[in-house]
Amino acid sequence: MNEPLDLLVIGGGINGAGIARDAAGRGLTVELVEKDDLASHTSSASTKLVHGGLRYLEQFEFRLVGESLREREVLLANAPHIIWPLRFVLPHEPSMRPRWMLQAGLALYDRLGGRKRLPKSRKVDLRIAPHRAILQDRLVAGFEYSDCWVEDARMVVLTAMDAKARGARISTRTECTNLVRSQANWLATVRDGNGERTIVAKAVVNAAGPWVDKVAKAALGQGTPAHLRLVKGSHIIVPRAYPGDHAYIFQQDDKRIVFAIPYERDYTLIGTTDLLYEGDLDDVQITSDERAYLREAVTQYLRSGVTEEDIVYTYAGVRPLYEDKAASNSTVTRDYVFEVEATGGAPILSVYGGKITTYRKLAEHALAKLSQHMNIPGEAWTVDAPLPGGDIADADFARFLWDAGERHIWIPPEMLLRLGRAYGTRIDKVVGTATALEGLGEHFGGDLYEAELEYLVAHEFARTADDVLWRRSKLGMHLSEQATDSVARWFAQRD
């Protein structure tokens, strides 16, 4: 039998990738297994924000908001190619929260996270451009504040890439089908396209997201003491609903909020819903009621409104939240919670909750929990460690892009921006030795060439057309059906 791994991580979402990266960087031997592609589920179905969660202040989740805001600054510095600042405009709706409450909440939001890189909140007059032509006449005043946009699935992939660079094994399309514990180790049976194999590991991290209870039951014969609450969030995408690079945050009668965010240059992203989910976790879909809710949510604010015919794309994901049934009123938290079970031998740590913004800190805390049951060498190290492509001087993306354009004057500006945003300083690895577009190989349509597909296969674990068109990028929204079919054929010919 091979020497046991230190850690088996089950789940290739942001939490699993983050824990694998941190552990590998401390010298642990690690393998991550994911039954589908990286970020196939919850981690690619977010509202794509690195933020503190303004509305969580009303729920008194001050620790979560403060940590999220501090992490917003850390992630912006370490991945300035896939994360960038975004200004949010919050119209004051007199029938909703009073103006003083919004102003006080934003003042607290500015202070909780030690804001350094982003401008502070301010009042805004909605009767002047650009808002006057966008919002309905009753909306005359509001507030503006900062958070960040993130390419969520790319953050997962880049985190997994860094884990691999530090020694972790990343096994996608590999499902853990059985877990057996001894006093010293776990024996995990995993299955991929080549059949079954056994992994021996001193500890297991169950970061399976919505499947966390399923994995726990496979390991322990029962669920963990935690109580899982599955909550679905759905989004719609419409043709660009308004000009400008700012986002809107709209208050709703049910006390929730809905975002309208510029998306992929030509579109507006609208979301999210928040519904208890009990359906098929491998086939999470938006419902007609959710589509109507989101359309009505923005139609009551925007002059143009949104119709059912405007919707060009939708997506939905399920968040695995922790429900504390020991509390008097059975509370559900948006914070992350760990359950460690080590009474029967080798430890297993199960992760509940979490959000993209706090994944790095979650990983630190997960390893701290495991250190009570096994030796975890080294210290926390990820706070100032850029993700692949994120080693941009002074996190100045504009200057980086200018320099890249000077080196590759033959790349059209829009293509250069897309490649720079996706790959950062690794753009030179994507284009290789090419000195003209013809040197990038087969042209599939738009600005997608074979050289980029070769890079994604070699470095980013891409194995299908969907991996490229919908997770490593959103080119599926921009390319013709003929082009996407050509990408699928390219992958089929490699099998």
Image: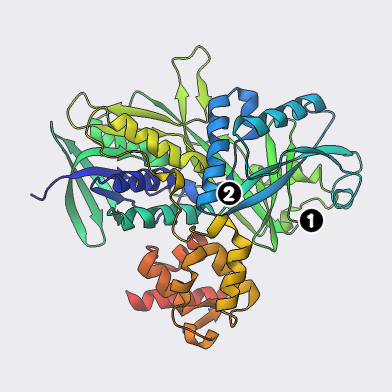
Asked where in the image residue 351 lies, by quadrant, the reply is top left
Q: Where is residue 165 in the image (x, y as percent from the top left)?
A: 32, 58
Q: Position of residue 196 (x, y in %)?
A: 19, 55
Q: What residue type is labelled 1?
A: Tyr
Say the numbered circle drawn on residue 183: none
Give the total number of marks visible in the rendering. Answer: 2
The quadrant the C terminus occupies is bottom left
Mark 1 to mark 2: distance in Å? 19 Å
Residue under numbered circle 2 = 48
Residue under numbered circle 1 = 242
Report the residue at 39% width, 45% height from top. Answer: 18
In the visual, does 333 lie left or right of 187?
A: right
Dot 1 falls on a residue whose secondary structure is loop
Report the residue at 64% width, 61% height from top. Answer: 264
418 up-or-down from 305: above or below:
below
Which residue is at the front of the view, 418 or 253? 418
Report the residue at 77% width, 29% height from top. Answer: 103
Q: Tell me if label 1 and label 2 are in contact, CB under 8 Å.
A: no
Q: Residues within 10 Å of mark 1 (few under 14, many from 20)?
A: many
Which residue is at the front of the view, 309 or 324? 324
Colour mode of the rendering: rainbow
Q: Position of residue 132 (x, y in %)?
A: 89, 49
Q: Position of residue 287 (x, y in %)?
A: 60, 45
Q: Which amino acid does label 2 sit on?
A: Lys
Asked where in the image residue 124 lies, by quadrant, the reply is top right
Which residue is at the front of the view, 70 or 359? 70
In the visual, does 131 lie left or right of 108?
A: right
In the visual, does 94 lie left or right of 441?
A: right
Q: How crowded is mark 2: few (under 14 residues within 10 Å), some or many (20 or more)?
A: many
Question: In the displayed image of the protein, which residue is found farthest to the front?
Answer: 394
